[in-house]
Image: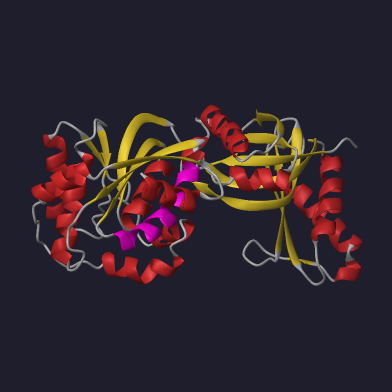
Amino acid sequence: MDEISYVVVFPTIFSKNKIPQLISNIKKILKIKNQQFKSVKRDGDIVLVDANDPVFASSAINLLFGIEKIAIARQIRNNFQDVISEITSIGGNLLLKGEKFLVKVEGISKGFVTKDVEIAATSNIIENKSNLGARPGTDTDFDKLLYTYLTKNNAYICIFSDKGNYGIPYQSQKQKTICAIYDEISAISCFETIKQGYDTKIIVCYRQKSELMNLVKMINHIIPRLVQNKIELEFLHVKINPNGIKNYLIYVNSVLEILLQYPNTRVSLALSPLVFSTDFIDNSLRHVFGKKKIPILPLTGVDTNLFDEAKEIGLERNIKKIEKLVTITTNEIPAFSKKDVEVALKTKKEITIQVGPNNIHDILDSFENH
């Protein structure tokens, strides 16, 4: 049987009408990560990557948004007996002693029911691997999932799979959007902006130099999602007292005023109604509209999965700080500091970095040498 292993990319339901953009992003990220590949093509609702090193290629591709899950799988013809045989062979080899396994088959079946494949393959594995004591699990209780996806002509028997980052492909929304990273919540908001498909420009604001290392570490987790070889960043020093809720709100409003100085029509705001008062958010929105720009609120609807996003961008150690930020209790709407904004704009440092393994050092060195 002629078997080919592919990296199989399963788009999210929201990405199924944006597969050409996803394919474009896959090609770009593989080139950026120096991963050799023969082809990137679609088979029905999935994308197949014929890569020289499927493990490293799948790891690179899984930086992208618009992916529900990603797998390394064998491709065979969509034929009842062949599919059962291949699941039995590959699945059996993946099992360890005493493991509970679940055979799951989805997709397009021709002349048979997927449930029949699941039952037949499960029976074969139990029989062939009786020495391992492997036994079938249930939909909610299993150690290993043996997953197969069927397209019109082919079947993909997964050797390995991992969940994706969901969202939609980067630059699906063609409009250029600007966002600022100045603390943990704003970093998560920027992450969400990219996840929602916007073509995103990032500026970085800081109050004191001691904040820079933490901010750059967050940026390092975010910029690979921009699917670009070179990234342009701008740093601005906003000299506002870092202590107290009122000063924090002045800082947030001052950063917004800085964002409004850029030509981008769309402005991403790191404001959630779960964190900030309605009056504070309404005031920010009015201010943006008043400048004839369009506000985007990527954190709207993001609740406790805000903490999942935090972990995704390397903020596990900052969870307590985020919890403190999200429990702000004030209805104050302090004005931005006009003087501090004017001074901050004069401190602007533009840095271009080549995306790679040394981003943190490259950014900090460029910043110091600027």
Which of the two residues, 135 or 61, is positioned nearer the viewer here?
Answer: 61
Residue 133 in picture, x, y percent from top left = 84, 71
Whether 198 is drawn above or below 114: the answer is above
Whether 291 is drawn above or below 180: the answer is above
Q: Residue, x 43% and y 44% (percent of image)?
A: 195
Q: Residue, x 38% and y 36% (percent of image)?
A: 198
Task: Give yes or no for residue 363 being in the magenta stretch.
Answer: no
Left or right: where 330 falls relative to 172 = left
Task: Give yes or no for residue 222 being in the magenta stretch.
Answer: yes
Residue 109 in picture, x, y percent from top left = 72, 37
Residue 60 in picture, x, y percent from top left = 61, 44
Instruction: Choose top left, top right, bottom left or bottom right for residue 206.
Output: bottom left
Left or right: where 297 falls relative to 342 = right
Say if residue 277 shows up in the picture.
no
- Most extreme residue toward the front is 369
Prevailing SS of the magenta stretch: helix
Residue 245 in picture, x, y percent from top left = 17, 66
Whether 303 is drawn above or below 78: the answer is below
Which of the two residues, 21 or 92, is positioned nearer the viewer here?
Answer: 21
Instruction: Choose top left, top right, bottom left or bottom right for residue 209.
Output: bottom left
Q: Bounds of the magenta span?
A: 209-225
Q: Quadrant of the N terminus?
A: top right
Q: Quadrant of the C terminus?
A: top left
